Image (cartoon, rainbow, N blue to C red):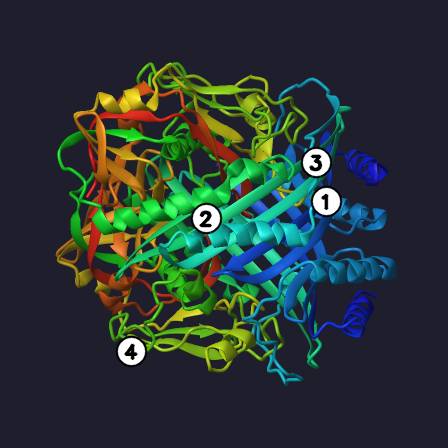
Amino acid sequence: MDFELAEFALKKATTLGASYADVRLESTTANGFLLKNGVPQISGFDKISGLGLRLIINGTLGFVSTNELEKNKIKELIERSAKKLNSASKIGENVKLSEETTAVANYEVKQKVKLADISPKEKLDALFDIEKGIVKSGVDVPGRYLSLSDNVTEKYFVNSEGSKIFSKIPRVEYFYFLTIKNGEQTAQRYWQYGKTAGFEALKGWNLPETMTREVKAMQKNLQIGIKPPKGKIDVVAAPQVVGIMVHESGGHPYEADRIYGREAAQAGESFITKDMMGKRIGSDVVNVVDDPTLKNSYGYYLYDEEGVAARRKYMIKEGIMTELMHNRETANVIGLKSNGSARATSYDREAIVRMSNTLMLPGDHTEEELIEDVKLGIYMKNFMEWNIDDKRVHQKYVGAEAYLIKNGRIEGPVSKPILEMSTQMLYKSIDAVGKNSEYHAGSCGKAEPMQAIPVWFGGPSIRIKNVRLGE
Amino acid sequence: MKREIARYLMKEFQKKGADDVVVCLTEDTSSQIKFSNNLISATQDWRADDLSVFASIKKKLVTTSIKDFSKKAADDTIKDLIKFAKSVEPSKEYEGIADGPFKYNSIQDGYDKKIKDMDGGIVDLTRKGINIALENGAKRTAGVTETHINNVFLLTSNGVEAEEKATKVYFSIRSFMDKYASAHYVSNSRMLKDLRLKEAAENSALVAKKAKNPTTCRPGLYDVVFEPLPFANLVEQMGTCSSIFYVEAGLSCLSGKLGTKIADEQVNITDDGTLKGGMNSARFDAEGVPTKVNKVVEDGIFKTYLHNTSTAKRHDTVTTANAGIITPLPYNTVLKKGNYKKEELLQGVKRGLLVTNVWYTRFQNYETGDFSTIPRDAVFLIENGKIKHPVKDLRITENLINVFKNVAAIGNDPWQIRSWDMELPVITPATLVKNVRITKSVE
């Protein structure tokens, strides 16, 4: 990696009048493998290198990126941007950044089993083992889309304030999409696993056994799943469901750039206004955090893309809205320091406010204790369809694997129960939180052009009291 | 130099035993102005060259790309990809790439020097759009203006050598009166003269003004007039569902439906890679086959899946020129326009809704087509053919084939739609759909 190129770009920006500039120089090696219905589709590897630079001229923010890593090409691009910024500043926002501590750091996530030491055959064999597990289950699964990918990103960040941060992060990701058939009926299920780690991550996921269990459960749901109960019931939501709930309604609405309108024409805004911090949103057992520093998490980092040290942020503390997620621009608007929430998917995307690992914190109940106090309800283990409006109020989750709870015991499967409720209703109806935390991976989309960024979402099982299911 | 490296890679891979090779050089220059709160939030400029390689070595399908156009980098890539291929399993269903060479027609209105030379002019275009919206009463605006200049150079081991250049311009504007009254319009074109910036900006403001103080309405069945932006979201789904890869992967509601009625007889959908000014129009597909017009839905009947050479052989048919070597995809999905002005579509509604935008479309089952999507921005209750008042907090919970079977009338003013939430371009007018299921949060 040519660090001198980053320094050159930085110097060029400041020479052209930038009051602030930062550079991300990145190099990623990646591998990908895909099976469709047991047949390898395509396997590949790639090395992606490039430079992204932000600069502020006359108070207006510019971003340039290129994979032509030559000084004259970089110079030309920065000069074009500077000229455009001088014109744009006539109707530009006056972007000011919070004052932050300069950081000099070098960190790496160690791989126990190096991805580079595992041959393509071994990676494809891992997919074939999962395929065999599904086929041997005896369940009719005519649609089997299995994908395994890994990458290692080296990143050098430098800014005009003297920060210099080097990081090396490996990621492993497994994605599956299955169609399970029973007679004429079908059900579908997809999910993703991801970690910052080496190839050892795969063993920990225990995928052949997990896939076998899931397809058998989905088959049973198709065979004997009953209609969901009507009227007011209790819902015990398992970690996969809790994770997506907190991501969508406990994470996204707290992104400060949405609240200030910067994402208005894309992923939308928020029901939250900046003066709502300190107000109650849920019961006092609800605690939702975003934490980039969780070891081996899929959204892991120690310094964000502005060189600010990462830390845990409490969006909801004991039911009270507590903290927004900020970058330096949004923090400055209300006179705060950034809490290190600036991320970008790659060198060719501007850094914006993003989640990392968004979780409900565990309580003190076992999952069994949550269930045994339910007279009539459902246990929703996972989901397929979900969405939420762009202000993050009205959310919907449709169960894929779900069960009836009667008098404190799990009975048979329930078919496609629908939770369709407001954010306020959800969080105030949570009366108990388990201690069985799990973390699940996703690719969260935001911004234009789209940035699908690796995240974890999760938490323990929770009980939602006295709610009606959707129809 | 880059083209020489492309030719070198082709020759060397063939020498080293590759049966099929496809080398594609793309050169991209893009710019964006992002605006929010009526001001420019950021300017963005991208420059990237990419040389991708696909090879089949005894049906072992492998791919990589290079960005360093030196001979050393090319030699390293050849060595690494051959070694990589030795370690993977063959794809028994692969049936090769098209036999060239081919002759190509030009894409009309596909390249505009005014876009290529625009540079700082993109700031003026943005300012113009914002001002039009403000002059028409918008309080707050957000959106983007983008330009793209792109060149593609393609070589295949079956005799194809093809090249084309393209320009694109895109304007997206969401106007707000207050937190709950907003409207979003987009315009996409290959030529600057075809950008409907003024209309998009005006519409966003005028419709937002009508959307103040929305109330709510009961869940149930409604006749819905979809504006082009939301209906494009659903037409795009039909387009991707016609890809044979999606069918085989379980991601399509058109599996097993060739020759059957999947829409009202008024519905005609084509996939048109040759469309004059089409955002995705191209002279050739990823194997170099000249693009064509494919009738996907004709008078409501599903007529064809989208194929590449390999999938077509496997399904005993011919390529539809939609490669993707692995995944065939539509180019421009076009819903044929009807005869109705928008006012006439509204007049056909006794009690219903006018939906101006949707987002977050997600499926419970892609094969059955059960999905939901959320109306956003202005939604209006219609009674006896007239807009009564704005409403909010609704969800469309439906089945994709059901929606198209219930098309009652199609508008006469198609818009070319591609937006941040919708990658593949669609050309569609406003459309009236009967008996659409609307649900809401349960309180």
In contact (CB < 8 Å): disc 2 and disc 1:
no
- Mark 3 or 1, nearer chain start: 3
Mark 4 or 2, which is nearer the eye? 4
Which residue is denoted by mark 4 in the rendering?
B299
Question: How far is disc 2 from disc 1 in space, using C-alphas?
Answer: 46 Å
> Amino acid type of disc 2?
Ile
Q: Is residue B101 above or below residue B360?
A: below
Crowdedness near tag 2: few (<14), some (14–19) or many (≥20) residues, C-alpha within 10 Å: many
> Amino acid type of disc 1?
Ala
Percent position of residue B240, x then y: 43, 64
Which residue is denoted by mark 3 in the rendering?
A55
Q: Is residue A117 above or below residue A15?
A: below
Q: Which mark is residue A116?
A: 1
Chain letter behind tag 3: A
Q: Quadrant of the N terminus of chain B?
A: bottom right
Which residue is denoted by mark 2 in the rendering?
B173
